[in-house]
């Protein structure tokens, strides 16, 4: 596929604690930057977001991705699609590919599955929620893994590191407990030029939207 990728996100989100810098189109921007894949960003309106793009994303979320005739939703699925287009993101040998895929799924199903609801309950005034023990267990196990290796898969950076670092860098999650190997890992992965550019571009996107809204 030679056409430019189209990454879809919201035209604006409120400033404040979240989610600027964490809207998940950043994952796709970051992957495209790492892989050198040309892309553009298009938007759907923040107002009415729950229903204004259900034909493209049945849960009314972002991001979703257009790659020629291929249209996809869910950031993890989109990342695996991009990884199949670039060896930078995922090795081509069967062992390296399997290793990468399992850690991508682990980031989503074993880590983010608990970090997101724990984060939500905490910011809504329920810090002593029933997820804390499970949350702690998953973070401790990731700390053990990261204390023993620099990269999650294939002895090099892959899309698995991109996704796991994005899951773990959320402020409340990152600040929870003493986990030096995890903190070093997050700093190492998010110091990559591709992340810095993707993050800066997303922040600039929403800041430009602020200016436009102020002129209405």
Image (spheres, rainbow, N blue to C red):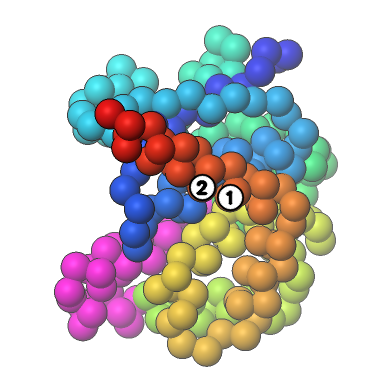
178 shown above or below 16: below
Secondary structure of the residue carrying numbered label 1: helix
Of badges 1 and 2, the one in the foreground is 2
Q: Which residue is mark 2?
A: 203
| Residue 20 rendering spot, x and y as whole percentages | 43, 51
Q: What residue is shown at x 51% (from left), y 47% (from top)?
A: 203
Secondary structure of the residue carrying numbered label 2: helix
Q: Quadrant of the C terminus?
A: top left
Q: What residue is shown at x 46% (from left), y 87% (from top)?
A: 177
Structural crowding at the residue carrying mark 1, measured as other residues with C-alpha within 10 Å and reported as few (<14), some (14–19) or many (≥20)? many
Tell me the quarter of the picture where residue 58 sits: top left
- Asked if the stretch drawn in magenta spans residue 125, the answer is yes
Furthest residue in direction top, as rendered: 69
Query: Magenta segment range?
Result: 105-134
Q: What residue is shown at x 79% (from left), y 42% (from top)?
A: 88
Please indicate whether residue 36 sits to the left or right of residue 196 in the image. Answer: right
Q: Nearer the viewer, residue 43 or 144?
A: 43
Please indicate whether residue 162 sits to the left or right of residue 206 in the image. Answer: right
| Residue 99 rendering spot, x and y as whole percentages | 69, 53
| Residue 65 rendering spot, x and y as whole percentages | 51, 26
Instruction: Residue 61: tell me if it is visible.
Output: no
Which label was assigned to residue 207? Answer: none
Q: Main secondary structure of the magenta part?
A: helix
212 shown above or below 30: above
Please indicate whether residue 121 sits to the left or right of residue 148 in the image. Answer: left
Label 1 close to label 2 by CB (< 8 Å): yes
Instruction: Residue 142: tell me if it is visible.
Output: yes
Q: What residue is shown at x 66% (from left), y 61% (from top)?
A: 190
Tell me the quarter of the picture where residue 73 sits: top left
Q: Which residue is mark 1?
A: 199
């Amino acid at each position: 596929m030679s056409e430019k990728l189209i990454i879809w996100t919201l035209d604006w989100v409120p400033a404040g604690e979240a989610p600027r810098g964490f809207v998940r189109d950043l994952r796709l921007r970051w992957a495209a930057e790492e892989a050198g894949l040309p892309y553009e960003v298009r938007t759907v309106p923040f107002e009415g977001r729950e229903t204004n793009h259900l034909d493209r994303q049945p849960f009314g979320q972002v991001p979703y991705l257009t790659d020629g005739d291929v249209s996809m939703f869910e950031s993890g699925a989109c990342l695996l699609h991009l990884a199949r287009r670039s060896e930078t993101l995922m090795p081509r040998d069967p062992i390296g590919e399997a290793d990468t895929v399992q850690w991508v799924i682990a980031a989503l199903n074993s880590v983010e599955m608990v970090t997101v609801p724990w984060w939500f309950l905490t910011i809504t005034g329920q810090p002593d929620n029933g997820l804390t023990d499970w949350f702690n267990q998953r973070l401790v196990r990731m700390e053990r893994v990261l204390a023993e290796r620099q990269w999650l898969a294939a002895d090099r950076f892959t899309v698995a590191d991109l996704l796991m670092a994005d899951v773990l860098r959320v402020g409340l999650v990152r600040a929870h407990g003493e986990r030096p190997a995890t903190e070093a890992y997050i700093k190492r992965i998010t110091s990559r030029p591709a992340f810095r550019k993707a993050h800066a571009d997303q922040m600039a996107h929403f800041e430009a939207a602020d200016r436009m809204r102020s002129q209405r």
